[in-house]
Image: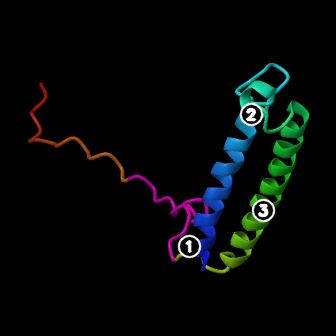
């Protein structure tokens, strides 16, 4: 079930990206908001209204799917733990450095 919802979520995300990119921004952007882009099908204002509504609907679907996926997967944590959840190992004192080997003592004069 969650796999199907995840695939739908991916398609909605890609559609949302596409719709946002084709909107006409203040600077022009990639927009098709002029009558040249749509031909005589819709006016510039009608195209802008359609794209705004489509963006709002896709955003609502995107948010709803994100919430549903989060609720479906909230209790399915894997057995692996995060490194942030583990405690640091107890530190052991470092062994003392090895002593210099002592040879036979030489007679002193």
Q: Could you give the CA–CA distance between mark 3 and mark 2, rounded to whole angstroms? A: 26 Å
Q: Secondary structure at mark 1?
A: helix
Query: What stretch of residues is rendered in magenta?
Result: 79-94
For the C terminus, the quadrant is: top left
Q: Decide which of 65, 56 is in the foreground and name it.
A: 56
The residue singled out by tag 3 in the image is 61
The outermost residue toward the top is: 27
Q: Could you give the CA–CA distance between mark 1 and mark 2, rounded to whole angstroms? A: 36 Å
The residue singled out by tag 2 in the image is 38
Q: Could you give the CA–CA distance between mark 1 and mark 3, rounded to whole angstroms? A: 16 Å
Q: Which mark is residue 3?
A: 1
Q: Residue drawn at (86%, 31%), measured in percent from left and top?
A: 44
Q: Decide which of 64, 72 is in the foreground and name it.
A: 64
36 to the left or right of 10 = right
- Mark 3 residue crowding within 10 angstroms, few (<14) / some (14–19) / many (20+): some
- Residue 44, compared with residue 60, is above or below; it is above
Mark whose residue sits in front, 1 or 3:
3
Indicate the position of residue 49 as horizontal and vertical percent values: 89, 42
Q: Main secondary structure of the magenta part?
A: loop
Indicate the position of residue 34 as horizontal and vertical percent values: 80, 26
Indicate the position of residue 57 as horizontal and vertical percent values: 83, 56
């Amino acid at each position: 079930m969650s796999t199907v919802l995840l695939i739908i979520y991916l398609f909605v995300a890609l559609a949302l990206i596409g719709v946002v990119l084709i909107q006409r921004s203040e600077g022009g952007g990639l927009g098709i908001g002029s009558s040249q882009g749509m031909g005589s099908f819709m006016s510039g204002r009608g195209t802008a209204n359609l794209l705004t509504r489509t963006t709002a609907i896709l955003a609502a679907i995107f948010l709803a799917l994100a919430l549903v996926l989060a609720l479906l997967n909230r209790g399915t944590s894997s057995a692996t733990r995060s490194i942030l959840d583990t405690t640091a190992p107890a530190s052991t004192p470092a062994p003392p450095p090895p002593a210099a080997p002592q040879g036979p003592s030489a007679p002193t004069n």
